[in-house]
Image (spheres, rainbow, N blue to C red):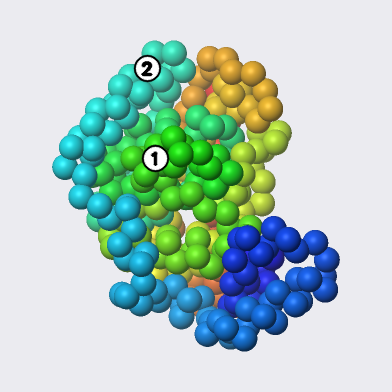
Amino acid sequence: MALAEARLGAHIPEQEATRIFTLGELIDAFEAASATETTVGQSWREILDVPASDELHQHYIFDRRPFLNPASFMAMRLLKLFSGIFFRMRVYGLENLPRTMPFLICPNHESFLDGPFLVSVLPRRVIYNIFIHGYSDYWETAFSRRLARMCNIVAIDPNVNLIRAMQVGAVGLKHGRVLLIFPEGTRSIDGHVAEFKKGAAIMAYELGVPIVPVGIRGTFEAWPRGGNFRFHAVEFHIGKPIDPSTFAQAADPYAAITEKLQSEVKMLSDDSGVT
């Protein structure tokens, strides 16, 4: 569904998508959508060029947060202190973060701990301007939606609505924000880095925004998918930014950037030294 939406530029509403079970129903849905959508045949550059009149430019990630930002910063620093004591959390390579925004942060995904722990070690300027792509299944209740809004988490389902998810990220980056996105799309099943999706590479290349690879070590052992929680050493290794413009001559820049990003994250997340 996501691949078809990207290739055809047509969007199937989530309510309709959940009722598609056969190839015939899929074809019928796209034929109906193509008749009303104007994005058919558009490139990713055109799709990510969201007009100023679009409601995404008034998204809650752009709200003024004069009280919430300082409160969030203090909460993250308390979490960093807690994690340093109980998880012996360490971070390496903070100096590799770009001095100016926007940029993307792309780590491997081992555990529910990844997002909050990683944000807790980031500089104040990044915490104040970060937004996060989060899988919509985890943010369905009224309380969780309110929490997502407070934490600048954008709840999306890229498997159903890839184009809108990409546009949300593009608009945020164009507004000078920092996007935290997990290119694997889901938590690791076995602790190893899974195949990366191209979404981060597409946004980086089309918007000219650097990608910062991050290797996370130890959170799988602390709280694995489907496993029990326990205290375990955690490390974050922040790599040097990847400049997407250096891939302009590649036959498929999106694939080349994705391959480079995945290679860097795999190297940074090699946890052979964590005990």
Q: Is residue 213 left or right of residue 52?
A: right
| Residue 264 visible from this viewpoint | no
Please tell me which of labels 2 and 1 falls first in the chain: 2
Q: Amino acid at mark 1?
A: Arg
The N terminus sits in image quarter: bottom right
Q: Is residue 119 above or below residue 157?
A: above
Count residues near mark 1 (Cα–Cα under 10 Å), then give few for <14, some for 14-19, many for 20+.
some
x then y, percent, for residue 112: 54, 32
User: Observer-nearest residue: 179 or 70?
Assistant: 70
Tell me what residue is drawn at x 58 percent, y 44 percent: 137
Could you tell me which secondary element the residue under label 1 belongs to? helix
> Residue 82: which numbered mark, if any?
2
Give amino acid for label 2.
Phe
Instruction: Indicate the secondary structure of the residue bearing disc 2.
Output: helix
Mark 1 lies on residue: 146
Look at 82% across and 73% down and name the residue there. 24
* Vertical order, 164 against 224 (above or below): below
Calculate the distance from the C-alpha at mark 2 to the C-alpha at mark 1. Answer: 24 Å
Residue 253 placement, left or right of 173: right
- Specify the quadrant of the image occupied by residue 71: top left
Residue 46: horizontal and vertical position, in percent? 46, 80
Q: Residue at position x 33%, y 19% from top? A: 81
Quarter holding the C terminus?
A: top right
